[in-house]
Amino acid sequence: MKFKLKYSEKVKVIYTLYPVISIVIALAILSLVIYIIGVDPIKALYYLYFGMMGNYNYVSETLIRATPILLVSLGLAIAFTAKVWNIGAEGQLYMGGLIAAIVALNSGGLPSAIAIPLIWICAGLAGAAWAFIPAILKAKYEINEIFTTIMMNYIAIYFTSYMLHGPLRDPVSHFPETPTIPENTWLPRIIPQYRFHAGSLFSLVVLVPLVYIMLSRSTLGFKLKLVGSSRESARYYGVDVEKSIIYAMLLSGFFAGLAGANEVTGVVFKMRPEISPGYGFTGIAVALLGRLNAFGVMLASIFMGGLINGSYTMHRMAQVPVGVAYFVQGLLIILVVAGEYILKRIMLVKGVSVR
Amino acid sequence: MVHLESSKDYVVVMKGITKVYPGGVVANRNIDFDLKRGEIHALLGENGAGKTTLMKILAGCLLPDKGEIYVKGERVKFRSPVDAIKKGIGMVHQHFTLIPSFTVAENIILGGIGGKREGIKLDMKAIEEEIAEFAKKHGLPINPKARIEELPVGLKQRVEILRLLYRKADILILDEPTSVLTPLEVKELFEALKRMASEGKSIVFVTHKLDEALSISDRITVLRKGEVVARIDNPKSISKEKLAELVVGRKIVYKAVKTKTLYDKTTPLMEIRNLKVLDDRGVLAVRNLNLTLYPGEILGLAGVEGNGQRELVEAITGLRRVEEGEIVILGKKVTNKPPKYIIELGVSYIPEDRTGRGVALELSVAENLIAKVHDKTPFSRRGILNLKSIYSFAKEAIEKFNIVTPSVKTPTMYLSGGNIQRLILARELSFKPKIIIAEQPTAGLDVAATEFIHKLLIDFRNSGCGILLISADIDEILKLSDRVAVIYGGRIVKVYDEVSRIDLIELSKYMLGVKTE
């Protein structure tokens, strides 16, 4: 009996620490791969760490890189709580970015305090509108949202590309991109000499706690949790399941749209075809790694931002391909999804409760 | 004691059987059990006493952790049900294992037809004739060409038994065989069992019903909490009260007192008129159904499973679309209104599917308790949950309804079935319901929990609530109801206004559709 208690306690500790454990396992596998391609893994990992947070500038860059991922994954945490599988954050981000650029280019003369919130809200609404199509298909006709959202990504990305090659193209640029947006629409920087901007600060300090409260303390969050746990029970409890699915999808689209606005107004200052190197997909891994908890998602997105930046440093200094960031990301999805499922099974059989 | 295992009279001897499930539940603790040739031996006990576990071990479905089994004088170790059937042991499980789209004959020969006929070609015609003959010989006549899904439950059970006999089983285990049958079918089953016993078959009759054990068995073994508490060699010598005490282990404390007729026919709580509802396949399951529920009554809905009960309940609670007709609750038309509207009128619903519908398993006990009222004060204000009042309400409910849980925050999936049902009751009965729809409220629960629920339902009836009780257990319907309505083929075929005057055989005939008004 005593042994059993200890065993179950152990499983509980493993479950709590599992996101960290899966990161360690992923990095271990990464080291092995680096070793196989003929690079000293210790050296490579050192540069990876250095590129993440070797000095204040790298920290600032990591936070900037983490912000669009954070925004996307906060939204996905909301959708995934209701078990609405929005894989379309990438497309929603592009639509957000496109609308952000259009509004910014036409906001000449507006004071920053009005222009920037206006741009962000319009971008969020654009992302939500893009998510509304799969949402309504899912809620009314039970069409699998995974397929529709994936396909909507392509439509958004190629539509953006068309707009940038055509109507929105900067006539003086050699690239298919919009003109630079006016300076009154640029996000202000917070610390002199560092690029860390108001969009990052706002996301970390305001949006993270807001989403946390929404998911754990609000009636809306409660409804989403109910729908996610069991649609059948939710219906029986009097929850409007269709409406909840639509809300979950719209909110996650809104946040993905904000991520687009963040890149346009805080980092690139124009809209480009390669505005996102897959933040919409990285957000999926981050939302799961952060266990759909806003603060967990925050830590996971900072880690992932750092990993992307660190992989560039690793590439420059140790000649390891840049793709390793996405390699680790893929490993993490598998480790987190499979590992947590297995641990939950073990805990269910052994009757340990986790919360 | 003589060595039973080598005696010719004893076909089964189990010694010191112990079975521990993962998670540490001891289902069987050092159990001795024996079965004589040609006897009907009742294995009596509450739900959860370990009866099914013990019999699954005998039938080769489970491996014991300790203990020895002797069959016809020979020590055996079964690795699968196939090993057991080779020794002549077969079990009819509570949930049937027939293939619905196959015919009776096809299901019976699934285990093989044996001998030289096991070739490439299957001569179904010859086999069907043979099976018809075989069934008749055993006093269990059946049409071998009928498809299983078209058969009533009683006949499905008959096919299960025939299948075992066809595979030459002479030791039959029947797990709660009467739980799905009408009184008429029970009578038929008992006659068939007695006949088989007189022909030399040995039968284990697993049940939790005292009357059945007393009326049919030659001997009774009583299990309680995984242990043998009594062996009764002569059931005629024991009174029902004494036996009840052995089964439960204590005197039952809850006593439900039903006051005299309360209901008043002038002000109906709920009226259902010409209701038509489709089932999941799009076939009419409720056809022109009319039913009225009055305040202060328990209206029992008797019927064989699958005659439209589920669709009727879902239509009332707003979970299923109504095609035609109307439902009026407290003077308001609720046809095709959302579930929330109906909940807020004061309609409580205790669903049959407790884990799939009655609770959200991933959510905590407290969350499930307030799920229907989470958007009302004091549980939330302006869209923000008030955790303090949620937890204090949950703690009160846990105490009042004896829900055993480590804490209010424990995910509901870690609760036992009985405690999940208590949780559902706590939620459905805590907010002053006017109508209670109780669907199989005590299925699978032990005697104490059943009595607890019966008392609650009667108390609510006494205080003016209208209760629609849907139950497969006729005894429960007769015990609790003020009126009984019989449903068959999606219609109410008979309403009894006086429960004491019900003729059980007539009731069965209505339930089986043999008789209509």
Image: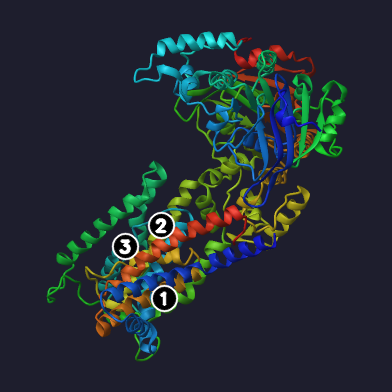
Calculate the distance from the C-alpha at mark 3 to the C-alpha at mark 2: 14 Å
**Picture coordinates of residue B405 (x, y %)?**
70, 54
- Residues behind callouts 3 and 1 on a single chain: yes
Earlier along the polypeptide chain: callout 3 or callout 2? 3
Name the kind of residue labelled 3 in the image: Glu
Tell me the tag on residue A90: 3
**Picture coordinates of residue A302 (x, y %)?**
41, 75
The image quarter in which residue A310 lies: bottom left
Tell me the quadrant of the picture where the C terminus of chain B can be found.
Answer: top right
Q: Does residue B497 appear in this view? A: yes
Residue B329 located left or right of residue A197: right
The image quarter in which residue B93 lies: top right
Q: For mark 2, what is the residue? A: A250
**What is the chain identity of the residue bearing mark 2?**
A
Residue B117 located left or right of residue B79: left
- Residues behind callouts 3 and 2 on a single chain: yes
Name the kind of residue labelled 1 in the image: Ile
Tell me the quadrant of the picture where the N terminus of chain B can be found.
Answer: top right
Calculate the distance from the C-alpha at mark 1 to the C-alpha at mark 2: 25 Å
The residue depicted at 15 percent of the width and 66 percent of the height is: A165
Dot 3 surroundings within 10 Å: few (below 14), some, or many (20 or more)?
Answer: many
Tell me the tag on residue A302: 1
Name the kind of residue labelled 2 in the image: Leu
Q: Nearer the viewer, mark 3 or mark 2?
A: 3
